[in-house]
Amino acid sequence: MLYYVLMLSAAAVVLLASDVRSESGRWAAFFLLSAATGGVARLWLQSPLPRVWFEIAQLLNQIVTPYGVLVFGLVYSGGAAAALTKQRRLKLWLLLPPAATLAYTLLRGNFEPNYPLMLIWAAPYYLAACALLIASYLRETDRRMRRSRLITVVITVPTLLGVVAFIHIAKTIWPDFDFFGYISVFFVYSFAIALLCVFVYGVLGVKVRVESDSLAGAMKAAGMGTSLLNHTIKNEVGKIAIGVENLRAAPDGKGLGEGDQLAVIERAAAHLMEMANRIHSRTRDFAWNPARCDPAALMVEALEPLRERFARQDVSLIEKYEGTEALFVDPVHLREAIGNVLANAADAMEAGGTLETKIAKERRDIVLSVRDTGAGMPPELLDRVWEPFYSTKQGKNNYGLGLSYVHQVLRKCGGRAEIDSKPEAGTVVRMRIPRSRR
């Protein structure tokens, strides 16, 4: 019994410790802790404490857990359900059945849960949560997120259905039925699957990595910081070199004007100095200084130093920025992230093609997308493109940090990066940033 309580409590603590700002993680921890009170109740039943302590703990477990599970399902599923859940009124409305059940129990003077009454609302809460989790998996288009949602469904849905069957339905039909042994099996199943997946794929944003040396993690972080600085220097010096080359070509009537080229060089140098200062502390985390900024302006700034390269490679540019609005992000890091995506697109279209940069306004997100008509990538590589130091390009100047950096920046923005690609059909990278962040 003690293992049951420790198992659920430990899972809740890990979720909170990994990212306390994640609302879905907080609600998952909430329902895990409330479920753990069922084990606490059984411990009290076997102790010399008065039976009323067992009944109170069991009542709270039966009333609070379905509420936490349903709100978690609403938040985690995303879309319209998550948007509605952000409004406190919905959470208060969902509290009415648990509150009414608690009030009825107190008035009755018997703390034993009324399972026929619970069946009316608690079972639908669990079933609705299952439906939301399954729908979120079916609706997801991003490969990594789809796998993550499938893992969540596999871990939670069988156990929630077991709760409905062995607690609410069985206890309503057979009041003396002891469900705890059956439910424990389902929780052990969920914990075992979660423990396995947390080492391999990650669960709800938590992934465990085993380091063979206590210095290994620090050394890898230091190496990544140095490589990221090198990556930034390579990009910005490349822009400066292009500007110098264009200045040399200017007397022959080629390239942009001298003032424009000097402006490109000046921006690249200033951006390089800003990034160098911030990456100085990269072994911990890069500095994040958010401000209100226009993503369309950042897209244009990131694209400007590459226009000459795209022209030389016979790449046609299509720019669509009708769906833009100000966002609360760090402009330096977001511009660098956009630049990395554009540089990858340029590398993919050495033989020419079409590049489309677009900003679209969705109900919850502003989506910055970069679409190229380059060689594309096979499906088996897509899951790895966000990994640090992984690169599909060969050469000493490719550090494999461009898209890893993009992924980190988008997480700092509260959004996510997505990629779709097929061989010979090109690649599109989408950077989703929530509109509601302040």
Image (cartoon, rainbow, N blue to C red):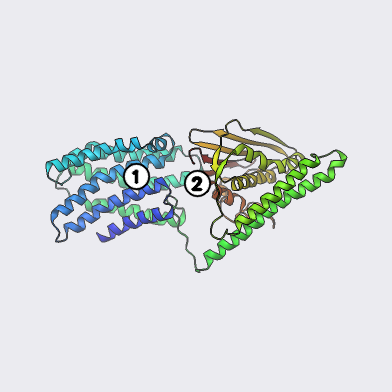
Q: Are circles 1 and 2 on residues that touch, CB within 8 Å?
A: no
Three-letter residue code for mark 1: Val
Residue 220 placement (x, y as % from top left): 56, 63
Question: Residue beneath label 2, please?
Answer: 144
Q: Position of residue 100 (x, y in %)?
A: 21, 38
Sequence order check: which comes first, mark 1 or mark 2?
2
- The residue at 43%/52% (across/down) is 19
Front residue of 213/140: it is 213
Residue placed furthest toward the top: 322
Instruction: Name the residue carrying label 1.
Output: 157
| Figure quadrant of residue 81 | top left
- In this orientation, does residue 382 appear? yes
Where is residue 231, by image quadrant? bottom right
Q: Tell me the crowding category of disc 1: few under 14, some 14 to 19, or many 20 or more residues within 10 angstroms, Cα based.
A: some
Q: Left of 235 or right of it: where is 279?
A: left
Outermost residue, right direction?
Answer: 252
Looking at the image, is 222 positioned above or below residue 428?
below
Q: Residues within 10 Å of mark 2 (few under 14, many from 20)?
A: some
Q: Quadrant of the N terminus?
A: bottom left
